Amino acid sequence: LAATGLGALPASASLAEDEIAKLTGGAETGAGDLKITAPEIAENGNTVPIDVSAPGAVMVALFADGNPTPAVATIKFGPLNPSHEASTRIRLAETQNVIAIAQMEDGSFQRASAEVKVTIGGCGG
Amino acid sequence: GNWSRLAAQQALTQEQLLEFDTFGNVSLIHVTDIHAQLKPIYFREPSVNMGVGDNKGAVPHVTGAEFRKLYGIADGSPSHYALSSGDFSALAQAYGRVGGLDRVATVIKAIRADRPDAILLDGGDTWHGSYTCYHTKGQDMVNVMNALQPDAMTFHWEFTLGSDRVAEIVEALPFAALGQNIFDAEWDEPTELFPPYKMFERAGTKIAVIGQAFPYMPIANPRWMFPEYAFGIRDENMQAMVDEVRSQGADCVVVLSHNGFDVDKKMATVVSGIDVILSGHTHDALPEPVLAGETIIVPSGSNGKFVSRVDLDVRDGRMMGYRHKLIPIFADVIEPDPEMAALIDAQRAPFEAQLTEVIGQTEGLLYRRGNFNGTWDDLICDALLSERDAEIALSPGVRWGPSLLPGQDITREDIWNVTSMSYGEAYRTEMTGEFLKVVLEDVADNIFNPDPYYQQGGDMVRTGGIGYRIDVSKPQGDRISDLTLLRSGEAIDPNRSYVVAGWASVNEGTEGPQIWDVVESHIAKQGTVSVQPNTSVEVVGA
Amino acid sequence: MASGVKPRVKVPKTASAGETITIKTLISHKMESGQRKDDDGNVIPRSIINRFVADFNGQNIIDVTLEPAISTNPYFQFEAIVPESGEFQFTWYDDDGSVYETSKAIEVS
Ligand SMILES: [Mn+2]
Ligand SMILES: [Mn+2]
């Protein structure tokens, strides 16, 4: 059991949606092959492993909708990247969704998200 | 109860306890969650163990009389005493202590006499939980377990010795230290120190044992003590390992797991091809395996109280059948193995005077195991409130810690058995009422989330000085209500700051006296401790 | 230039022509988010790696814009096709104008 941290930050889900709308110009975001993989529970909110797989995408933008600043990263895939997949580690201030927006070769957008629980922790068997 | 000690012991013989109709061609022996209990102890099983979601009402979430009814266990029988709660103090007088690794050694030797190449597997939580273990940084347990000659082990509390000490011990272990889910945190790669599995050849068949360490170590315990490692359930890697050992000719796949029972049950349905899961962490003891898909799950209790024997018939690349027995270690019935007894005494000898010092007496039964406060927890919370001059006390919901019977002396060893850890500092801090609720909701979701993969902690955090109502069926944020400061009877004010004392913080740099000193000082002042029945937590939704 | 910044990469030494390999990269950097305060309550200014690029023989594999939400010691793992023998180039751009580079040769057999 811990005695500090967590809880004081505002939910900024609408901030994330604003940024996503700016990116897509308000265009529809469909489902597709875009996939984001994250742990159900973060072992450490300061370094949460995230994997994004975006076949057919030229670019993927990542957002964390519970962080005070939702933008996380923008990944462009070059000609020598066969899988359009990348893994990184991100900071999550609290339990929230990590959202991926992929821009496809034809200019359309796909969206995928994964919820990650960030817990205070403590206490074991 | 009317069970006289003599009658009980006459009714029970070592032969009976060890009786086993040898079966098939492979034997597994499973011990787990010993928590450094070298000597016989009393250990009361939980009376409250609630299941949620799909596991509501399913074992091991059945206790007391209902549990006995489910398994056809007679009231007052040895199995009643060993496996369930109810009438504990009276039955303990009759049947005596349980466990003791010298008795465990006798049982293991007897099984090996039957089946010399039986595979002995330790599920972890071994190098933690006592005065001598703390002071030797696990060495007493390593010495004693090595003498038992296990074939493999997996891990949880061991890591709270710190990664350097763990590496030092593991490098010298004469058996496999397994963990398919122990990864190098920096590069997200398997480690050399903890291989995922080991293959054993027995009776012309290949048995693969895959290790599964406690998945949520960096959450439930201080991650700063082992920053080099990442864990997690890692289903996909488990499946890959099962496929890999099968492709290498494994006829039978055994997972030595420290997931906890409900997580094991889910993993058995997500991952295909596991024959047997030897289950640890949640300290459950069941008289027969539970079938999940085509996998049998065998939980083997804790604190040295049980040894599981599982005989398998492995033929033509398949497990064709099994026979199982959960052997309760009745300390007055099973002869201690003399060599092991001597080895155990040698570990304890340098500390004997400190261990046996009597600090006080207890009027009532002191126990811990259960979803909410046990009387040991209440006593610890009382100690925190008075010794740290706090309004509210928080104590971790760990599942380890033996029981003491009414009228027993409380020795220093007894106090350490329920408090010993490498981060035992008893902090004193201020928390707003709002934050206190956030803490309780957070912990509650780590035990009552309907998805077992989110059940990452121990039991519910123990509280002193406050009362509350919990609806376990609700989602996070809605479970806890009616928070009351017991001292004044007033509702907890979200905006007020309260003085909170607790221990076992996962935060680095936590300051305060060690909890065992706090508890010892409190008990010494009381002389005889008398813990009032705790009615301050109202539980609904079960 | 920030002190203690050190890039590390894991790339196989050999591959067959056209093979897909996995690359892992790390750069030790504290990634000061610009949202933390010091003991006196002053905001600690943002100082992060803001861009990471991986190329092979001048052709791009991945080009990432990083925000402060990327963890300390930024880590990236990705795949790359190896058309011929040559050199991987990895470049990290720091807020303070520093550029950190490292390269790895690969032999196509
Ligand atoms: Mn345990
Ligand atoms: Mn455990």
Image: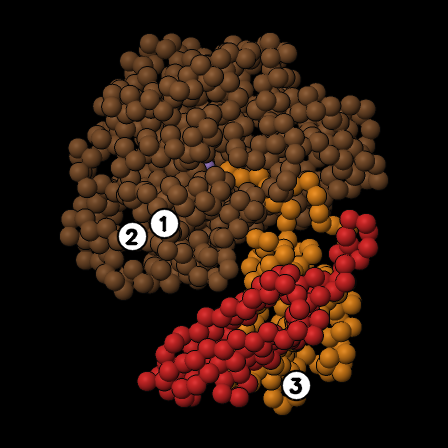
Chain colours: A orange, B brown, C red
- How many marks are shown on the rendered structure? 3
Task: Locate the N terminus of chain B by quadrant.
Answer: top left
Q: Give percent across and percent down for residue A125.
A: 51, 38
Residue B19 occupies quadrant: top left
Residue at 47% of width from left, 25% of height from top?
B131
| Mark number, residue B198 | 2
**Residue neighbourhood size for the residue with mark 3, other residues' Cα within 10 Å, grouped as few (<14), some (14–19), many (≥20):** some
Mark 3 residue's CB less than 8 Å from ligand 2: no
Q: Amino acid at mark 1?
A: Leu
Q: Is residue C56 left or right of residue B211?
A: right
Q: Does residue B502 show up?
A: no
Q: Nearer the viewer, mark 1 or mark 3?
A: 1
In the picture as drawn, the residue positioned furthest to the left comes out as B204
| Mark number, residue A108 | 3
* Chain ID, mark 1: B
**Residue neighbourhood size for the residue with mark 2, other residues' Cα within 10 Å, grouped as few (<14), some (14–19), many (≥20):** some
| Mark number, residue B380 | none
Q: Is residue A38 above or below residue B4?
A: below
User: Are the residues flagged by discs 1 and 3 in contact, CB closer than 8 Å?
Assistant: no
User: Are the residues flagged by discs 1 and 2 in contact, CB closer than 8 Å?
Assistant: yes
Q: Amino acid at mark 3?
A: Ser
Q: Nearer the viewer, mark 2 or mark 3?
A: 2
Q: Amino acid at mark 2?
A: Lys
Question: Which residue carries the number 1 mark?
Answer: B178
To the question of a shared chain for discs 2 and 3, the answer is no
The Cα–Cα distance between marks 1 and 2, rounded to whole angstroms, is 8 Å
Residue at 52% of width from left, 29% of height from top?
B420
Q: Secondary structure at mark 3?
A: loop
**Which numbered disc flags the more N-terminal residue, 1 or 2?**
1
Seen from the viewer's position, the closer of residues B33 and C3 is: C3
